[in-house]
Image (cartoon, rainbow, N blue to C red):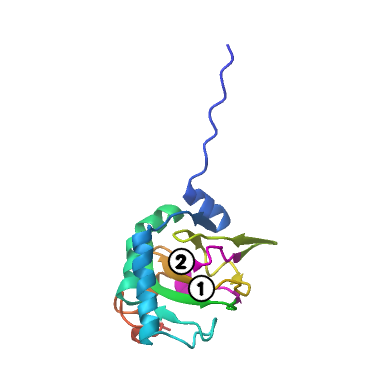
Amino acid sequence: MTLAPPPTQRPSIAAVFARQGFVIVNRMAPEPVLAEVRDHLLARAAAGTVITDDEQVPGTPCVYGGAVLDGLMEELRPAVEHCTGLKLYPTYSYGRLYKHGDALPKHRDRAACEISVSLNLSQVPDEPWPLHVQIGEHVVPVKLKPGDALLYRGIELTHWREPYAGESLAQVFLHYVDQDGPHAAEKFDRRPALAMPHGTRMAKKP
């Protein structure tokens, strides 16, 4: 009697993240959630209560934190913990309304972005704009549809975008740190609590 070999088990998503430092999660957020956050960013832009001097993408409307974006960051934290296999502290959220011609220079993120989520809220036209991630000698062009997200180690992996050929793309970034890691002190981005403005960040202890 010949026994069949045991079925090959697929590695868990957390094991994949641990091995390569990033994972793509399809449909991480449903359309009603995307619409709420997207409409919030558009309303802020219309009211002129946005950041326009962003160092990475000058002239493009951006929003740091606040109740809506930080609320989404906390709402998705259990899912991000499942995908990474880590217990996480939220640090800060950041929304950006990209426009035609925008580009994101090659960079790595600061300490508060140990674990980062790039979530596509909407795009016009419906054609993904690759977020390039450098993995050793290889470049992975990550293409996200609305609702899809890239989870990655933002302070370890170089990432960037080439000039945008589309019309508009709404994106939100959610950042976390490992509760047991070297950047745990970046909890809440060193603010007293979530939803507090950037100006309430406390200086690092020497």
Q: Label 1: which residue?
A: 168
Q: Label 2: which residue?
A: 122
- Kind of residue indicated by mark 1: Ser
Q: Is residue 26 above or below residue 173?
A: above
Q: x%, y% of residue 1?
A: 57, 11
Instruction: Identify the mark nearer the N-term, 1 or 2.
Output: 2
Query: Which residue appears at 57% of the width and 77% of the height?
Result: 100
Q: Which mark is residue 135?
A: none
Q: Quadrant of residue 101?
A: bottom right
Query: Which residue appears at 36% of the width and 81% of the height?
Result: 44
Q: x%, y% of residue 180?
A: 40, 62
Compare residues 119 and 185 and report the one nearer the observer. Answer: 119
Q: Is residue 32 above or below residue 68?
A: above
Check contact, mark 1 vs mark 2: CB within 8 A.
yes
149 vs 79, left or right, is: right
Q: Is residue 45 above or below residue 139?
A: below
Crowd tier of the residue under label 1, counting other residues whose Cα lies within 10 Å: few below 14, some 14–19, many 20 or above: some
* Magenta stretch, residue numbers: 104-132
